[in-house]
Image (spheres, grey):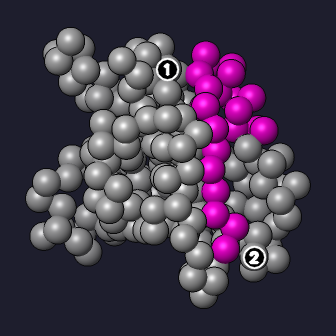
Amino acid sequence: MTKLVILDRDGVINEDSPNYIKSPEEWIPIPGSLEAIARLNHSGFKVVVATNQSGIARGLFSLEQLNAIHQKMRQALERVGGHVEGIFFCPHTPEHGCDCRKPRSGLINEIKKRLNFDISKAYMIGDSYRDLQTAWIVGAKAILVKTGNGNHTQAQYDQELSNTKVYSDLANAAKSIVQEHYLMS
């Protein structure tokens, strides 16, 4: 059985910035996040990234710069024995009204189509309310991490998170997911 984890990028895998991550030099992994992805991989999970990257439409960085950031991330993952199956991103601002910007389901529908996967069996991990909304909309298992904007999200939306698992970071979320799957098999 194929297992899938969908990750937000900024604030989950790497440090976030209110000024956007605009270059490979600004991309700094959160301690333990790369190893968490490797742990998921080694436990049979496919891992993909679904990320809003409106900095492209805002003119803050180019598609080439985004690709260079993702190349740095992939290389850093390889060094710890991990990888991602794909990186899906929305380059638009909220004003574009596109279907691919989270919390809309376009990115997840593309993942479903490309990987031929039942999203209701997938985990979706994020640090913002829109990540959780996306998971709820597509029927994935929503997980909030407290890194990035996670503490703020938890404080602001605590009442709505009663059925959502919350972890301090991706490393602890991955550990729990792996344990849960070993108990179920």
Tag shown at residue 57: 2
Range shown magenta: 71-92
Q: Name the spot of residue 152 as percent of width and height, x first.
A: 34, 68
The quarter of the picture where the C terminus appears is: top left
Task: Say if the magenta span includes residue 35.
Answer: no
Q: Secondary structure at mark 1?
A: helix
Local SS, label 2: loop
Given contact means CB atoms under 8 Å apart, are the residues at marks 1 and 2 in contact?
Answer: no
Residue that mark 1 sits on: 41
Point out residue 182 in the picture as x, y percentages from the top left corner.
24, 14
| Closer to the camera in the image, 60 or 133 | 133
Q: Is residue 83 magenta?
A: yes
Q: Is 155 situated above or below 82? A: below
In the rendered image, residue 59, in percent from the top left (x then y), is placed at 82, 77
Q: Is residue 55 left or right of residue 85?
A: right
Task: Answer left or right for 41 relative to 14.
Answer: left
Q: Is residue 151 visible?
A: no
Query: In the figure, is residue 24 to the left or right of 180?
Result: right
Q: CA distance from mark 1 to mark 2?
A: 32 Å
Q: Dot 1 surroundings within 10 Å: few (below 14), some, or many (20 or more)?
A: many
Q: Amino acid at mark 1?
A: Asn
As shown in the figure, which amino acid type bears the numbered disc 2?
Ala
